[in-house]
Amino acid sequence: RRCEGLSSVQVYEDQGGGVASHLRRVLLGEAKPQPVLPAAAALPLLFNSGLDHSQREAVGLGVGSTDLCLIHGPPGTGKTTALVELLLHASCRRGERVLLTAPSNVAVDNLLERLLAASKQLTGPEYRKIKALRLGHPARQSPAIVHHSLEAQIAAAEGTEIVHDVRAELQA
């Protein structure tokens, strides 16, 4: 499936390219990633002052990366904490949209819970509020973040009752 996905990006590349085609080439080793922006070496302000040196370095590389940044290490080394810091910089400070993925539902939920908890601590007009949307089956999501699921947000959206009424009238 992964190869099929990358092949579909090849079709996109053949039609003019763009960011996705460059990222595809980087992921396949056909191109080198863009260098880290030098300004990222000195992070302006950390949200979590308790980060150790390696976590700060990882966040700096992530903030300065234009293509991608991989953070890896054994369990318990602070990857999730570093990722929360990096995501706060991207979403709250810079207003970027972020797609968060992980190899398991538990990992996504853990990271999202920690990100949302950390973002609630931020105050001031310079920080943007995080609007999280959790995709996936609600039965496989943590109860703490299930209200961020697509199904829950649709159910809570304005006009949902009207849609249900219209559907009921059409079926009658």
Image (cartoon, grey):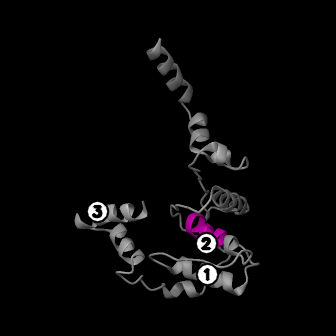
Q: Which residues are magenta?
A: 83-93
Which residue does the numbered mark 1 point to in the structure image? 58
Q: Amino acid at mark 1?
A: Ala
Q: Is residue 2 above or below residue 157?
A: below
Q: Which residue is mark 2?
A: 86
Quarter that holds the N terminus: bottom left
The amino acid type found where label 2 is placed reads Leu
Task: Work out whether residue 53 or residue 22 is closer to the camera in this orientation and state it.
Answer: 22
Q: Position of residue 6 (x, y in %)?
A: 37, 65
Kindly report the distance in space between the C-alpha atoms of the residues bearing marks 3 and 1. 31 Å
Which secondary structure lies at badge 3? helix
- Give the farthest residue toward the left: 15
Q: Magenta includes 3?
A: no
Q: Residues within 10 Å of mark 2 (few under 14, many from 20)?
A: many
Magenta portion: prevailing SS class:
helix
Q: Earlier in the sequence, mark 2 or mark 3?
A: 3
Q: Secondary structure at mark 2?
A: helix
* Secondary structure of the residue carrying numbered label 1: helix
